[in-house]
Image (spheres, rainbow, N blue to C red):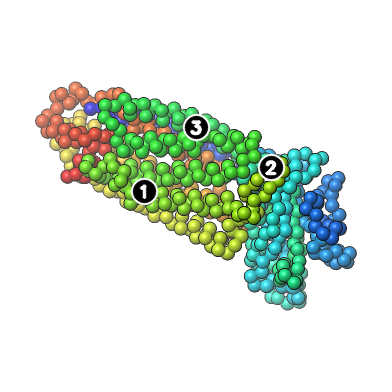
């Protein structure tokens, strides 16, 4: 009886394969822990206060905080008052990166977080629900001598959430409020060497603009460089993708070729394994290499889409993988049976896609900026779903609900694995009636399958943990919480685990050319032949697959 490699390969060879995969798994963690730096780097900037002597704001004028063409600067607002400089003529300038450094496309993305330093004054306190109106522009250039080219300009509103921890008395004037970090700007590609931010806080008492926001002393930016992906980590990440893509592609072609050589058509489980291999290949393809040479601002969204497709396929595969070992031969091999389980996974993935679209590609007509040299840009880099109360509540609710659903999914998967184990245990009662050789053979198959199911549960647990932490890690800057720090080893280790798991599934469930027990079958007793017939009359990839189907039918 020919079956899958998982049941026909000798124990010695199977152990060798397992040890090799385990070593590769350890290596994937070591790559992140010993070679790759931290995934993101945060650099703090203090805005320089420049003076715009021109009464009316000129759109093409940029203020440099340092260098040969630096602006006229003031140290604080007391100096501005003494020189009779109005608030509307003060420009907060930030140059990214710091002097003698350059940005690089290897940084992949840049997230800028804003924080106000607001001093307490009895006569100028922060009102409840205060909103800061920010007139901000960002420009770029690729050398220190050329003129700045405008990238985007926008009027943004950010709600202030500040607390004054001491008593509001005259003695405590000058102390600072504790204000939450505010989402400010996100670039999906760091294509240029130098960036310049010019920030204005226009004041108009008649229109109630920037009134009741306290006495702002300074503006600080956190750039992950405000937050960019570390270039060293990016190189390691791209190298892993480049190495793993042909590895999975080769095993995928080899697996499907073996499936097509069989005399019977492939069953649902084999088709789903092939689809899982396709999704793994899709997420592996290192298209990010092009982002180093091209200014593709949509790469973050494309990466999220690929990740979402893989999540949906992997979670669906585990459901079908367990379900096919629970159904009888009449119900199994039909995808429609799993609509109740797979449907919520697809719906959740679609919701994840909508959330990413809102977060990364939310452009309105007013966000469409036309530049002679860049065509039409359909993204306002200063837009953030976290900027409004409704957006923040929806985003936080999504992250919380997604985490709860991931945990519930894992619990449901554990229940299905328990059901599979109980299904197999019911069939083990027939083993004592077999000959010793055949009984040992089936006991070995059951042990191998149970071990694979435990590995599957471990992989699922790590995937759920990674999903929750990655969602929290993506949003923790928006919440102003610095507690979450994901190590590079975790990223590379989980990514390596997915590839090794998919590789192992396709290898172990590929049809084997080896036939087990031909001679023993010829001399088997009548009970053995009868048992084998009742087990194997249903087509399937493995003996366990056929055994559980027969037990479910009984």
Sooner in the amino-acid sequence: mark 1 or mark 3: 3
Indicate which disc, 1 or 2, sits on the residue closer to the N terminus. Answer: 1
Q: Which residue is mark 1?
A: 342
Q: How many marks?
A: 3
Q: Nearer the viewer, residue 173 or 210?
A: 210
Residue picked out by circle 2: 374
- The residue drawn where x is 69% and y is 67% is 177
Residue pictured at 75% horizontal, 71% vertical: 205
Viewer-closest of 263 and 234? 263
Report the side of 214 relative to 350 (left or right).
right
- The span from disc 1 to disc 3 (Cα, nearest Å) is 28 Å
Helix, strand, or loop for circle 2?
loop
Label 2, label 3: how far apart the Cα atoms are: 35 Å
Residue 545 in sight in this render: yes
In what element is the residue under mark 3? helix
Seen as rendered, the residue at the extreme top is: 519
Give the label, 1 or 3, closer to the camera. Answer: 1
Instruction: Determine whether, in the image, residue 77 is placed left or right of residue 190.
Output: right
Q: Is residue 483 visible?
A: no
Q: Position of residue 200 (x, y in %)?
A: 75, 59
Q: Dividing the picture into quarters, in which one does residue 457 lie?
A: top left
Q: Nearer the viewer, residue 194 or 368?
A: 368
Q: Residue 380's x, y, as percent?
A: 64, 52
Nearer the observer: mark 2 or 3; the answer is 2
Residue 527: assigned label: none
* Point 23% across, 27% down: residue: 1
Residue occupying the point 26% across, 42% down: 332
Q: Looking at this view, is 271 or 473 the one in front?
A: 271
- Vertical relation: 553 (above or below) 518: below
């Amino acid at each position: 009886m020919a079956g899958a490699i998982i049941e026909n390969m000798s124990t010695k060879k199977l152990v060798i394969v397992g040890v090799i995969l385990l070593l590769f798994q350890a290596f994937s963690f070591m790559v992140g822990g010993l070679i790759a730096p931290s995934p993101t780097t945060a650099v703090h900037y203090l805005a320089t206060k420049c003076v715009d002597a021109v009464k009316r704001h000129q759109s093409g004028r940029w203020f440099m905080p340092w260098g040969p063409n630096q602006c006229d600067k003031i140290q604080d607002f007391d100096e501005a008052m003494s020189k009779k400089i109005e608030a509307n003529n003060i420009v907060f300038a930030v140059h990214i990166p710091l002097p003698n450094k350059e940005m690089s496309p290897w940084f992949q993305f840049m997230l800028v977080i804003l924080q106000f330093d607001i001093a307490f004054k009895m006569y100028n306190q922060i009102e409840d629900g205060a909103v800061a109106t920010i007139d901000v522009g960002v420009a770029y250039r690729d050398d220190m001598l050329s003129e700045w080219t405008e990238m985007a300009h926008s009027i943004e509103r950010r709600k202030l959430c500040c607390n004054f921890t001491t008593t509001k008395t005259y003695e405590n004037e000058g102390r600072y409020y504790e204000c939450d970090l505010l989402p400010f700007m996100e670039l999906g590609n760091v294509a240029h060497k130098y960036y310049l931010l010019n920030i204005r806080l226009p004041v108009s008492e008649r229109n109630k603009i920037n009134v009741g926001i306290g006495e702002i002393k300074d503006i600080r930016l956190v750039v992950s460089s405000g937050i960019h992906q570390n270039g060293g980590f990016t190189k390691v990440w791209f190298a892993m993708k480049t190495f793993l893509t042909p590895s999975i592609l080769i095993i995928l072609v080899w697996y499907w070729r073996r499936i097509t050589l069989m005399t019977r058509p492939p069953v649902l489980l084999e088709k789903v394994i092939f689809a899982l291999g396709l999704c793994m290949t899709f997420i592996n393809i290192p298209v990010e290499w092009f982002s180093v040479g091209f200014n593709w601002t949509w790469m973050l969204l494309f990466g999220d889409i690929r990740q979402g497709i893989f999540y949906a396929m992997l979670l669906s595969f585990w459901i079908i993988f367990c379900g096919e070992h629970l159904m009888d031969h009449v119900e199994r091999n039909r995808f429609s049976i799993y609509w109740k389980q797979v449907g919520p996974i697809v719906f959740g993935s679609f919701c994840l896609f909508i959330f990413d679209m809102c977060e990364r590609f939310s452009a309105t007509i007013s966000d469409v900026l036309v530049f002679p040299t860049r065509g039409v840009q359909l993204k306002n880099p200063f837009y953030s779903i976290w900027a409004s109360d409704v957006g923040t509540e929806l985003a936080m609710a999504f992250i919380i609900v997604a985490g709860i659903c991931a945990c519930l999914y894992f619990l449901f998967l554990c229940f299905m694995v328990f059901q599979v184990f109980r299904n197999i245990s019911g069939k083990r009662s027939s083993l004592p009636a077999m000959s010793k050789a055949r009984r040992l053979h089936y006991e070995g198959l059951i042990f191998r399958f149970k071990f694979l199911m435990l590995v599957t549960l471990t992989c699922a647990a790590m995937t759920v943990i990674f999903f929750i932490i990655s969602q929290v890690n993506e949003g923790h800057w928006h919440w102003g919480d610095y507690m979450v720090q994901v190590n590079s080893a975790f990223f590379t280790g989980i990514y390596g685990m997915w590839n090794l798991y998919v590789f192992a599934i396709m290898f172990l469930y590929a049809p084997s050319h080896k036939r087990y027990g031909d001679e023993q079958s010829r001399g088997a007793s009548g009970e053995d032949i009868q048992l084998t017939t009742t087990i194997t009359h249903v087509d399937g990839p493995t003996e366990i697959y056929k055994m559980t189907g027969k037990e479910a039918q009984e």
